Amino acid sequence: MPTRAKRMPMAALLTLSFTIFVNITVEMLPMGLMLPMSRDLGVGEETIGLLVTVFAFTVVLTSTVLIWLTRRIPRHMLVIGVLIIFGLSSLAVAIAPGYWAIVAMRIVGGLAHGVFWAVVGSYAAYLVPKEALGRAVAIVNSGGSFAFVLGVPLATLLGQVVGWRWTFAVFGLLSLIASVVVWRLLPRVDHLADDVVAQTGPVEVVPGDVPGRSTRRARTLGPVVAAIVAVTLVMIGQYAVYTHITPYLVHQGGLPEVWLSPVLLIYGVLGAVAVLALSIWFGKRPTLEAIVCLAAIAVAMVVLVAVDVLPLVIGAVLLWGLAFGAVPPLLQTRMMQATPTRWLQQAMAWYTTGFNIGIGGGALLGTGIILAFGFGALPWALAIGAVAAIVLMAATARR
Protein backbone atom coordinates (compact mmCIF):
# COMPACT_ATOMS: atom_id res chain seq x y z
CA MET A 1 0.00 0.00 0.00
CA PRO A 2 1.50 3.38 -0.99
CA THR A 3 2.29 5.89 1.70
CA ARG A 4 -0.45 8.50 1.98
CA ALA A 5 0.14 12.13 2.71
CA LYS A 6 -1.13 13.46 6.05
CA ARG A 7 -1.89 16.86 4.60
CA MET A 8 -3.72 17.69 1.41
CA PRO A 9 -1.10 17.64 -1.39
CA MET A 10 -2.49 20.74 -3.07
CA ALA A 11 0.19 21.04 -5.78
CA ALA A 12 -0.49 17.49 -6.94
CA LEU A 13 -4.29 17.85 -6.77
CA LEU A 14 -4.24 21.15 -8.66
CA THR A 15 -1.95 19.59 -11.27
CA LEU A 16 -4.52 16.84 -11.83
CA SER A 17 -7.23 19.50 -11.98
CA PHE A 18 -5.34 21.42 -14.67
CA THR A 19 -4.96 18.31 -16.82
CA ILE A 20 -8.71 17.63 -16.52
CA PHE A 21 -9.46 21.24 -17.51
CA VAL A 22 -7.45 20.85 -20.71
CA ASN A 23 -8.85 17.42 -21.58
CA ILE A 24 -12.52 18.28 -21.08
CA THR A 25 -12.14 21.53 -22.98
CA VAL A 26 -10.63 19.71 -25.96
CA GLU A 27 -13.36 17.06 -25.81
CA MET A 28 -16.05 19.75 -26.01
CA LEU A 29 -14.33 22.07 -28.54
CA PRO A 30 -16.63 21.13 -31.45
CA MET A 31 -19.65 22.37 -29.45
CA GLY A 32 -18.27 25.90 -29.29
CA LEU A 33 -16.71 25.82 -32.77
CA MET A 34 -19.65 24.23 -34.60
CA LEU A 35 -20.46 27.16 -36.87
CA PRO A 36 -16.95 28.06 -38.12
CA MET A 37 -15.96 24.40 -38.53
CA SER A 38 -19.15 23.70 -40.48
CA ARG A 39 -18.54 26.60 -42.84
CA ASP A 40 -14.86 25.83 -43.37
CA LEU A 41 -15.20 22.08 -43.85
CA GLY A 42 -18.37 22.25 -45.94
CA VAL A 43 -20.45 19.91 -43.75
CA GLY A 44 -23.63 20.35 -41.74
CA GLU A 45 -23.59 21.56 -38.15
CA GLU A 46 -25.02 18.26 -36.92
CA THR A 47 -22.07 16.51 -38.61
CA ILE A 48 -19.65 18.61 -36.58
CA GLY A 49 -21.59 17.62 -33.46
CA LEU A 50 -20.83 13.98 -34.27
CA LEU A 51 -17.15 14.71 -33.54
CA VAL A 52 -18.14 14.77 -29.86
CA THR A 53 -20.00 11.47 -30.22
CA VAL A 54 -17.10 9.80 -32.05
CA PHE A 55 -14.69 10.94 -29.35
CA ALA A 56 -16.93 9.73 -26.51
CA PHE A 57 -17.74 6.35 -28.05
CA THR A 58 -14.04 5.73 -28.70
CA VAL A 59 -13.53 6.09 -24.96
CA VAL A 60 -16.44 3.75 -24.27
CA LEU A 61 -15.20 1.01 -26.58
CA THR A 62 -11.50 1.08 -25.72
CA SER A 63 -10.80 2.44 -22.23
CA THR A 64 -11.22 -0.81 -20.28
CA VAL A 65 -9.04 -2.82 -22.68
CA LEU A 66 -6.36 -0.13 -22.84
CA ILE A 67 -6.24 0.21 -19.06
CA TRP A 68 -5.75 -3.54 -18.77
CA LEU A 69 -2.97 -3.48 -21.39
CA THR A 70 -1.22 -0.61 -19.59
CA ARG A 71 -1.77 -1.97 -16.07
CA ARG A 72 1.94 -2.44 -15.31
CA ILE A 73 3.08 0.94 -16.60
CA PRO A 74 3.82 3.38 -13.73
CA ARG A 75 0.85 5.73 -13.36
CA HIS A 76 3.04 8.84 -13.42
CA MET A 77 4.64 7.85 -16.71
CA LEU A 78 1.27 6.83 -18.17
CA VAL A 79 -0.34 10.20 -17.41
CA ILE A 80 2.55 12.00 -19.12
CA GLY A 81 2.34 9.70 -22.14
CA VAL A 82 -1.40 10.08 -22.72
CA LEU A 83 -1.18 13.86 -22.34
CA ILE A 84 1.48 13.96 -25.06
CA ILE A 85 -0.63 11.80 -27.38
CA PHE A 86 -3.68 13.92 -26.61
CA GLY A 87 -1.79 17.12 -27.37
CA LEU A 88 -0.37 15.83 -30.64
CA SER A 89 -3.80 14.64 -31.81
CA SER A 90 -5.22 18.12 -31.15
CA LEU A 91 -2.39 19.72 -33.09
CA ALA A 92 -3.08 17.29 -35.91
CA VAL A 93 -6.73 18.39 -36.00
CA ALA A 94 -5.50 21.95 -36.44
CA ILE A 95 -3.76 21.05 -39.71
CA ALA A 96 -6.10 18.29 -40.91
CA PRO A 97 -7.04 18.69 -44.61
CA GLY A 98 -10.67 17.62 -44.25
CA TYR A 99 -13.48 16.31 -42.09
CA TRP A 100 -12.56 12.62 -42.13
CA ALA A 101 -8.96 13.35 -41.19
CA ILE A 102 -10.36 15.21 -38.19
CA VAL A 103 -12.54 12.21 -37.33
CA ALA A 104 -9.41 10.01 -37.36
CA MET A 105 -7.56 12.38 -35.05
CA ARG A 106 -10.54 12.60 -32.69
CA ILE A 107 -10.45 8.81 -32.45
CA VAL A 108 -6.77 8.98 -31.50
CA GLY A 109 -7.62 11.62 -28.90
CA GLY A 110 -10.42 9.43 -27.57
CA LEU A 111 -8.02 6.50 -27.14
CA ALA A 112 -5.74 8.66 -24.99
CA HIS A 113 -8.65 10.27 -23.16
CA GLY A 114 -10.07 6.96 -21.95
CA VAL A 115 -6.76 5.92 -20.39
CA PHE A 116 -6.26 9.42 -19.00
CA TRP A 117 -9.59 9.47 -17.12
CA ALA A 118 -9.26 5.98 -15.68
CA VAL A 119 -5.80 6.81 -14.30
CA VAL A 120 -6.26 10.45 -13.29
CA GLY A 121 -9.70 9.76 -11.84
CA SER A 122 -8.26 7.31 -9.31
CA TYR A 123 -4.92 9.08 -8.75
CA ALA A 124 -6.22 11.14 -5.82
CA ALA A 125 -6.96 7.94 -3.89
CA TYR A 126 -3.23 7.24 -3.74
CA LEU A 127 -2.43 10.70 -2.42
CA VAL A 128 -4.85 11.28 0.48
CA PRO A 129 -6.42 9.32 3.34
CA LYS A 130 -9.84 7.85 2.59
CA GLU A 131 -11.58 10.31 4.90
CA ALA A 132 -10.18 13.19 2.81
CA LEU A 133 -11.12 11.60 -0.52
CA GLY A 134 -14.30 13.67 -0.96
CA ARG A 135 -12.41 16.97 -0.74
CA ALA A 136 -9.58 15.67 -2.93
CA VAL A 137 -11.96 14.48 -5.66
CA ALA A 138 -13.80 17.82 -5.55
CA ILE A 139 -10.52 19.73 -5.97
CA VAL A 140 -9.40 17.50 -8.84
CA ASN A 141 -12.79 17.70 -10.57
CA SER A 142 -12.91 21.46 -10.28
CA GLY A 143 -10.87 21.43 -13.49
CA GLY A 144 -13.91 20.00 -15.24
CA SER A 145 -16.16 22.72 -13.89
CA PHE A 146 -13.73 25.42 -14.97
CA ALA A 147 -13.64 23.82 -18.41
CA PHE A 148 -17.31 24.75 -18.71
CA VAL A 149 -16.82 28.14 -17.02
CA LEU A 150 -13.70 29.24 -18.91
CA GLY A 151 -12.56 26.55 -21.33
CA VAL A 152 -15.51 26.25 -23.70
CA PRO A 153 -16.40 29.99 -23.70
CA LEU A 154 -12.72 30.85 -24.20
CA ALA A 155 -12.44 28.34 -27.03
CA THR A 156 -15.54 29.81 -28.65
CA LEU A 157 -14.09 33.30 -28.40
CA LEU A 158 -10.75 32.15 -29.81
CA GLY A 159 -12.57 30.48 -32.67
CA GLN A 160 -14.29 33.75 -33.51
CA VAL A 161 -11.10 35.81 -33.26
CA VAL A 162 -8.33 33.60 -34.68
CA GLY A 163 -10.20 30.66 -36.21
CA TRP A 164 -11.08 27.15 -35.11
CA ARG A 165 -7.78 25.61 -36.27
CA TRP A 166 -5.71 27.91 -34.06
CA THR A 167 -8.05 27.10 -31.17
CA PHE A 168 -7.27 23.39 -31.47
CA ALA A 169 -3.57 24.26 -31.76
CA VAL A 170 -3.65 26.35 -28.58
CA PHE A 171 -5.24 23.58 -26.54
CA GLY A 172 -2.94 20.99 -28.08
CA LEU A 173 0.00 23.04 -26.81
CA LEU A 174 -1.67 23.35 -23.40
CA SER A 175 -1.89 19.57 -23.24
CA LEU A 176 1.84 19.29 -23.92
CA ILE A 177 2.49 21.92 -21.23
CA ALA A 178 0.33 19.88 -18.85
CA SER A 179 2.55 16.85 -19.44
CA VAL A 180 5.56 18.89 -18.30
CA VAL A 181 3.68 20.12 -15.22
CA VAL A 182 2.78 16.51 -14.35
CA TRP A 183 6.41 15.45 -14.75
CA ARG A 184 7.57 18.14 -12.33
CA LEU A 185 4.78 18.34 -9.73
CA LEU A 186 2.79 15.09 -9.58
CA PRO A 187 4.20 12.52 -7.12
CA ARG A 188 4.86 9.01 -8.32
CA VAL A 189 2.68 6.32 -6.75
CA ASP A 190 3.01 2.57 -6.33
CA HIS A 191 -0.08 1.03 -7.88
CA LEU A 192 1.44 -2.48 -7.98
CA ALA A 193 1.48 -3.26 -4.28
CA ASP A 194 2.76 -6.77 -3.55
CA ASP A 195 3.39 -7.20 -7.29
CA VAL A 196 0.06 -9.00 -7.64
CA VAL A 197 -2.16 -7.55 -10.34
CA ALA A 198 -5.56 -8.50 -11.63
CA GLN A 199 -7.26 -6.38 -14.26
CA THR A 200 -6.02 -2.88 -13.48
CA GLY A 201 -4.79 -2.85 -9.90
CA PRO A 202 -3.34 -4.74 -6.94
CA VAL A 203 -5.32 -7.59 -5.40
CA GLU A 204 -4.99 -9.78 -2.40
CA VAL A 205 -3.68 -13.31 -2.88
CA VAL A 206 -6.56 -15.66 -2.06
CA PRO A 207 -5.48 -19.31 -1.60
CA GLY A 208 -8.93 -20.72 -2.15
CA ASP A 209 -12.60 -20.01 -2.18
CA VAL A 210 -14.11 -18.92 1.11
CA PRO A 211 -17.75 -19.58 1.95
CA GLY A 212 -19.76 -16.40 1.67
CA ARG A 213 -17.09 -14.58 -0.35
CA SER A 214 -19.33 -14.27 -3.43
CA THR A 215 -22.14 -12.80 -1.34
CA ARG A 216 -19.83 -10.32 0.36
CA ARG A 217 -18.34 -9.35 -2.99
CA ALA A 218 -21.80 -8.71 -4.46
CA ARG A 219 -22.72 -6.56 -1.45
CA THR A 220 -19.44 -4.66 -1.77
CA LEU A 221 -19.82 -4.01 -5.47
CA GLY A 222 -23.54 -3.12 -5.32
CA PRO A 223 -22.98 0.56 -4.43
CA VAL A 224 -20.12 0.72 -6.96
CA VAL A 225 -22.31 -0.55 -9.79
CA ALA A 226 -25.16 1.71 -8.65
CA ALA A 227 -22.92 4.79 -8.80
CA ILE A 228 -21.66 3.87 -12.28
CA VAL A 229 -25.18 3.23 -13.61
CA ALA A 230 -26.42 6.42 -11.94
CA VAL A 231 -23.75 8.60 -13.52
CA THR A 232 -24.47 7.02 -16.91
CA LEU A 233 -28.18 7.83 -16.67
CA VAL A 234 -27.55 11.36 -15.42
CA MET A 235 -24.99 12.10 -18.14
CA ILE A 236 -27.27 10.79 -20.89
CA GLY A 237 -29.96 13.18 -19.70
CA GLN A 238 -27.48 16.00 -19.16
CA TYR A 239 -26.02 15.88 -22.65
CA ALA A 240 -29.37 15.31 -24.31
CA VAL A 241 -30.25 18.78 -23.01
CA TYR A 242 -26.90 20.58 -22.72
CA THR A 243 -25.68 19.71 -26.23
CA HIS A 244 -28.71 21.56 -27.57
CA ILE A 245 -29.02 24.18 -24.84
CA THR A 246 -28.38 27.15 -27.13
CA PRO A 247 -31.24 26.54 -29.58
CA TYR A 248 -33.44 25.31 -26.70
CA LEU A 249 -33.09 28.56 -24.74
CA VAL A 250 -33.68 30.69 -27.84
CA HIS A 251 -36.52 28.74 -29.49
CA GLN A 252 -38.25 27.24 -26.46
CA GLY A 253 -37.27 29.51 -23.57
CA GLY A 254 -37.57 32.79 -25.46
CA LEU A 255 -34.08 33.94 -24.43
CA PRO A 256 -32.63 36.67 -26.67
CA GLU A 257 -29.46 35.50 -28.39
CA VAL A 258 -27.44 38.33 -26.87
CA TRP A 259 -28.16 36.86 -23.43
CA LEU A 260 -26.89 33.39 -24.26
CA SER A 261 -23.25 33.94 -23.31
CA PRO A 262 -23.98 35.63 -19.94
CA VAL A 263 -26.54 32.98 -18.93
CA LEU A 264 -24.30 30.05 -19.87
CA LEU A 265 -21.32 31.70 -18.19
CA ILE A 266 -23.30 32.09 -14.96
CA TYR A 267 -24.46 28.47 -15.34
CA GLY A 268 -20.83 27.37 -15.41
CA VAL A 269 -19.79 29.69 -12.57
CA LEU A 270 -22.48 28.22 -10.32
CA GLY A 271 -21.23 24.72 -11.14
CA ALA A 272 -17.74 25.78 -10.10
CA VAL A 273 -19.16 27.27 -6.89
CA ALA A 274 -20.76 23.90 -6.11
CA VAL A 275 -17.45 22.10 -6.60
CA LEU A 276 -15.67 24.70 -4.44
CA ALA A 277 -18.26 24.20 -1.69
CA LEU A 278 -17.66 20.45 -1.87
CA SER A 279 -13.91 20.89 -1.54
CA ILE A 280 -14.29 23.12 1.55
CA TRP A 281 -17.42 22.14 3.43
CA PHE A 282 -19.18 19.14 1.95
CA GLY A 283 -18.37 15.74 0.44
CA LYS A 284 -18.45 13.77 3.72
CA ARG A 285 -21.90 12.30 2.97
CA PRO A 286 -21.75 11.91 -0.81
CA THR A 287 -24.86 9.72 -1.11
CA LEU A 288 -27.19 12.14 0.67
CA GLU A 289 -25.65 15.18 -1.02
CA ALA A 290 -25.93 13.53 -4.45
CA ILE A 291 -29.61 12.72 -3.86
CA VAL A 292 -30.32 16.34 -2.85
CA CYS A 293 -28.55 17.70 -5.95
CA LEU A 294 -30.28 15.22 -8.27
CA ALA A 295 -33.65 16.20 -6.79
CA ALA A 296 -32.85 19.88 -7.46
CA ILE A 297 -31.99 19.03 -11.07
CA ALA A 298 -35.29 17.16 -11.50
CA VAL A 299 -37.20 20.16 -10.12
CA ALA A 300 -35.37 22.50 -12.50
CA MET A 301 -36.26 20.31 -15.49
CA VAL A 302 -39.93 20.18 -14.50
CA VAL A 303 -39.96 23.98 -14.29
CA LEU A 304 -38.46 24.22 -17.78
CA VAL A 305 -41.16 21.93 -19.14
CA ALA A 306 -44.05 23.57 -17.28
CA VAL A 307 -43.41 27.29 -17.72
CA ASP A 308 -42.33 29.67 -20.45
CA VAL A 309 -41.88 32.78 -18.30
CA LEU A 310 -38.36 34.00 -19.05
CA PRO A 311 -37.27 34.82 -15.46
CA LEU A 312 -38.40 31.38 -14.29
CA VAL A 313 -36.64 29.73 -17.24
CA ILE A 314 -33.39 31.51 -16.37
CA GLY A 315 -33.82 30.65 -12.67
CA ALA A 316 -34.34 26.96 -13.51
CA VAL A 317 -31.24 26.92 -15.72
CA LEU A 318 -29.14 28.48 -12.94
CA LEU A 319 -30.48 26.01 -10.33
CA TRP A 320 -29.59 23.23 -12.76
CA GLY A 321 -26.04 24.58 -13.13
CA LEU A 322 -25.52 24.87 -9.38
CA ALA A 323 -26.82 21.37 -8.65
CA PHE A 324 -25.15 19.62 -11.56
CA GLY A 325 -21.73 21.04 -10.73
CA ALA A 326 -21.69 18.89 -7.59
CA VAL A 327 -23.16 15.67 -9.01
CA PRO A 328 -20.20 14.11 -10.90
CA PRO A 329 -17.67 14.53 -8.03
CA LEU A 330 -20.24 13.30 -5.49
CA LEU A 331 -21.04 10.17 -7.49
CA GLN A 332 -17.34 9.58 -8.12
CA THR A 333 -16.58 10.00 -4.41
CA ARG A 334 -19.33 7.58 -3.45
CA MET A 335 -18.05 5.06 -5.98
CA MET A 336 -14.42 5.37 -4.84
CA GLN A 337 -15.27 5.17 -1.14
CA ALA A 338 -17.23 1.97 -1.79
CA THR A 339 -14.50 0.38 -3.95
CA PRO A 340 -11.78 -1.80 -2.40
CA THR A 341 -8.33 -0.47 -3.28
CA ARG A 342 -7.47 -3.51 -5.36
CA TRP A 343 -10.43 -2.81 -7.70
CA LEU A 344 -10.07 0.95 -7.78
CA GLN A 345 -8.65 1.49 -11.25
CA GLN A 346 -10.93 -1.10 -12.85
CA ALA A 347 -13.94 0.58 -11.24
CA MET A 348 -12.70 3.96 -12.44
CA ALA A 349 -12.37 2.61 -15.98
CA TRP A 350 -16.01 1.50 -15.89
CA TYR A 351 -17.02 4.85 -14.38
CA THR A 352 -15.26 6.60 -17.26
CA THR A 353 -17.02 4.31 -19.71
CA GLY A 354 -20.40 5.15 -18.20
CA PHE A 355 -19.58 8.85 -18.23
CA ASN A 356 -18.72 8.81 -21.93
CA ILE A 357 -21.70 6.64 -22.84
CA GLY A 358 -23.67 9.48 -21.32
CA ILE A 359 -21.88 12.14 -23.37
CA GLY A 360 -22.12 10.38 -26.72
CA GLY A 361 -25.47 8.72 -26.14
CA GLY A 362 -27.01 11.86 -24.68
CA ALA A 363 -26.14 13.92 -27.75
CA LEU A 364 -27.76 11.30 -30.00
CA LEU A 365 -30.79 10.98 -27.71
CA GLY A 366 -31.29 14.74 -27.74
CA THR A 367 -31.28 14.78 -31.54
CA GLY A 368 -33.87 12.00 -31.59
CA ILE A 369 -36.10 13.76 -29.06
CA ILE A 370 -36.00 17.00 -31.05
CA LEU A 371 -36.90 15.23 -34.30
CA ALA A 372 -39.71 13.26 -32.66
CA PHE A 373 -41.19 15.67 -30.12
CA GLY A 374 -39.51 19.07 -30.51
CA PHE A 375 -37.23 21.08 -28.23
CA GLY A 376 -39.85 21.31 -25.49
CA ALA A 377 -39.47 17.63 -24.59
CA LEU A 378 -35.70 17.78 -23.99
CA PRO A 379 -35.81 18.45 -20.21
CA TRP A 380 -37.72 15.20 -19.62
CA ALA A 381 -34.58 13.23 -20.54
CA LEU A 382 -32.62 14.75 -17.66
CA ALA A 383 -35.56 14.71 -15.24
CA ILE A 384 -36.08 10.96 -15.79
CA GLY A 385 -32.33 10.27 -15.56
CA ALA A 386 -32.05 12.20 -12.28
CA VAL A 387 -35.02 10.41 -10.69
CA ALA A 388 -33.69 7.00 -11.76
CA ALA A 389 -30.31 7.87 -10.23
CA ILE A 390 -31.98 8.89 -6.96
CA VAL A 391 -33.72 5.51 -6.80
CA LEU A 392 -30.39 3.72 -7.33
CA MET A 393 -28.63 5.79 -4.68
CA ALA A 394 -31.40 5.27 -2.12
CA ALA A 395 -31.65 1.54 -2.81
CA THR A 396 -27.95 0.98 -2.07
CA ALA A 397 -27.47 3.68 0.60
CA ARG A 398 -27.23 1.29 3.58
CA ARG A 399 -24.60 -0.81 1.85
Image (tube, helix red, strand yellow):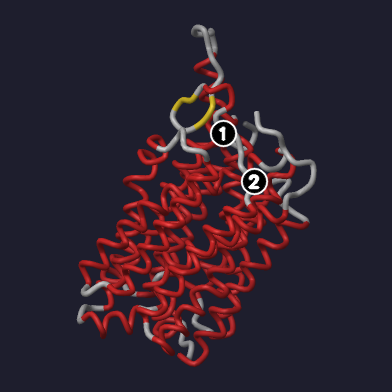
Label 1 CA crowd tier, 10 Å (few <14, some 14–19, many 20+): many
Label 2 CA crowd tier, 10 Å (few <14, some 14–19, many 20+): some
Position of residue 264 measured from the top left corner of the image (x, y, whole percent): 53, 78
User: Disc count in the image?
Assistant: 2
Say which of 101 and 227 sits in front.
101
Look at 43% across and 90% down and name the residue there. Answer: 161
Mark 1 to mark 2 CA distance (whole Å)? 12 Å
Q: Which residue does the numbered mark 1 point to in the structure image?
A: 191
Compared across the picture, whether 90 is left or right of 80 comes to left
Quadrant position of residue 94: bottom left
Amino acid carrying label 1: it is: His
Q: Which residue does the numbered mark 2 point to in the structure image?
A: 187
Amino acid carrying label 2: it is: Pro
At mark 2, the secondary structure is: loop
Position of residue 65 measured from the top left corner of the image (x, y, whole percent): 35, 38
Image quarter of the N terminus: top right
Quadrant position of residue 167: bottom left
